[in-house]
Image (cartoon, coloured by chain):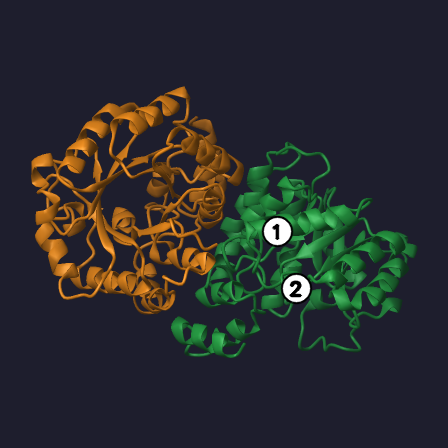
Chain colours: A green, B orange
Amino acid sequence: MFREKIKILDCTIRDGGLINNHDFDLGFVQKVYRAISAAGVDYMEVGYKNSKKLFSSKEYGLWKFCEDDQIKRVIDNVKSNTKISVMVDIGRVDIDDVKPADESPVDMIRVACYVKDIDKAITMANHFAAKGYETTFNIMAISRDNGTELDEALDQIEKESKAIAVYIVDSFGALYQEPTEELVKRFKAILKTREVGFHAHNHLQLAFGNTIEAIIHGANFLDGTIYGIGRAAGNCPLELLIGFLKNPKFDIRPILDIISREFIPLRKKIEWGYIIPYAISGMMNEHPRAAMALRQTDRKENYKDFYDDLLDSR
Amino acid sequence: MFREKIKILDCTIRDGGLINNHDFDLGFVQKVYRAISAAGVDYMEVGYKNSKKLFSSKEYGLWKFCEDDQIKRVIDNVKSNTKISVMVDIGRVDIDDVKPADESPVDMIRVACYVKDIDKAITMANHFAAKGYETTFNIMAISRDNGTELDEALDQIEKESKAIAVYIVDSFGALYQEPTEELVKRFKAILKTREVGFHAHNHLQLAFGNTIEAIIHGANFLDGTIYGIGRAAGNCPLELLIGFLKNPKFDIRPILDIISREFIPLRKKIEWGYIIPYAISGMMNEHPRAAMALRQTDRKENYKDFYDDLLDSR
């Protein structure tokens, strides 16, 4: 599947940060940046740009805040064509923290939002675009939040924003291939001058399969993470995506190497991947928070009761 | 996806047996049979019917041979509508070991074969059909062995056999969705009076996604295993398949329960699932034997060298 327009964004540190309070040490992030750069991946997202007025830097690691100086320490002296992305949530960023793009190591700001917040999201994204950043919208919880308001939100993005891409975000890991196809077609029909992106979660072991499905129907901005790290069941494994695309600009070897060296040991310390309570959440189209809470208890392998409880709670 | 004609076959013990020399103890197989029966799964495949003249019962467990008496010990006194299946390989079964169906607990015999062996396979399957068994063909290594001879073999099956279904077997775990779609359509075009089946391997995390793809295009006989157990990366997880189908005849709870009780502990003793060397085999459309051998060495997590070696060996 060689298609020039396809851009891969690695969000290893950003989505992986959701399972360790964004507390990757600088050396680790540097190794990931070197591997991503050597692999020829288009973008690397290093975390969230949250306000230190709202979150404590005692409680969270560096990549909850993504200060320019910390990012510079990661990327300085590394030969790379990989652009740097950060994510912002509505209401959690202080826009005055964001310098003009030409004074910052950040190239792209992705605005994560629900459909209901689209006005705020557009205002914010346009502010960042005016400061010189590439911007995108990442529409979360799409497996639930897909009524007619979604069409209106997409239409508004098309008419009022400068975003280069709009992502379908399967926050609950609940999409199968047919709903994925339907969503990509719906996004493309409205977003005539923007790219469609896809961010999967692997609750049902479909993160990679749905990403392929999205590619088939025209999505060109694709998220992956090394060894699939990410919240709950994790994301689309970057190594599988590169293996599928067969685009000569990508090299899988640095990714295989860093999995061996860093991610196999890391997986013994923090948990992500195919874990039955996350599969159950996905099947029921529920947020994984109940499953994440279960995994912290001594009933963590009691799947049948969790299934019954989640069914009853609906 | 509620479709009356869909039949699920659980091959937990048969394909799982490939990673432990078919040495599941009787109590474990009884527990699996009870769970599969309670879940309403259509078939359970308990192993291979191999000749004891060819394989030593010192080296292999009960489910390499699947003697009727052993199967009876599993199923006796259990209320069940699940039919029993065994698999045979060309050249490894003594057909005189197989009693008439009405004297045996076995309902179905699946003949695993390569395209080149189709004449032998049809002769053998017709012999079993004459003895009163349901029969199928399971065409292995389909991601490689799919030249024009495949069409001829399917045509021969359609004209000369009594098989109820013919399975696409992705032995190398190398299929993506588009080749899966193409194969199902090709099988269906020739096998006008038979069902098409699908047996996936999970090397690329696509076992479930490809099984859905096969269902979408009309495959009705579907293989799964509990918690995805099976050779190398394993198979399509039965629990995900049942969750997707939403057919009221299936109940996911007994499967969730046996995963908690038996398969989580088992996975700590024997290995299957998403493991990078198997992903590399799948990407390269190679048999997983080199990856399986690697996993027995102290270089088992050295993925980059394995990738380079496998590439060089082609």
Going from N to C along the chain, the mark reached first, 2 or 1, is: 2
Q: Looking at the image, can residue B158 be seen?
A: yes
Determine the chain carrying the residue at label 1.
A
Q: Which residue is at the front of the view, B122 or A231?
A: B122
Q: Which residue is at the front of the view, B192 or B119?
A: B192
The local crowd at label 2, few if under 14, some if 14 to 19, many if 20 or more residues have their Cα within 10 Å, is many
- Which label lies toward us, 2 or 1? 1
Horizontal and vertical percent position of residue B43: 27, 52
Q: Secondary structure at mark 2?
A: loop
Q: Which residue is at the front of the view, A263 or B181?
A: B181
Q: Which residue is at the front of the view, B194 or A215?
A: B194
User: Split into 4 quadrants, where in the image is the C terminus of chain B?
Assistant: top left
Say which quarter of the image contains residue B168: top left
Q: Which residue is mark 1?
A: A180
Respond whether the residues carrying marks 2 and 1 are from the same subunit.
yes
Please, which residue is most extreme toward the right here? Answer: A130
Amino acid type of disc 1? Thr
Tag count: 2
In the picture provided, is B270 more to the left or to the right than B204?
left
Q: CA gap, disc 2 to disc 1?
A: 13 Å
Q: In the rendered view, tell whether residue B97 sits above or below residue A288.
A: above
Horizontal and vertical percent position of residue A101: 87, 54
Q: Residue shown at 19%/53% (left/top)?
A: B23
Amino acid type of disc 2? Ala
Horizontal and vertical percent position of residue B140: 33, 34
The local crowd at label 1, few if under 14, some if 14 to 19, many if 20 or more residues have their Cα within 10 Å, is many
In the picture provided, is A239 more to the left or to the right than B156?
right
Do the residues under discs 2 and 1 have CB atoms within 8 angstroms?
A: no
Horizontal and vertical percent position of residue B118: 27, 26
Instruction: Give the numbered dot on residue A141.
Output: 2
Determine the chain carrying the residue at label 2.
A
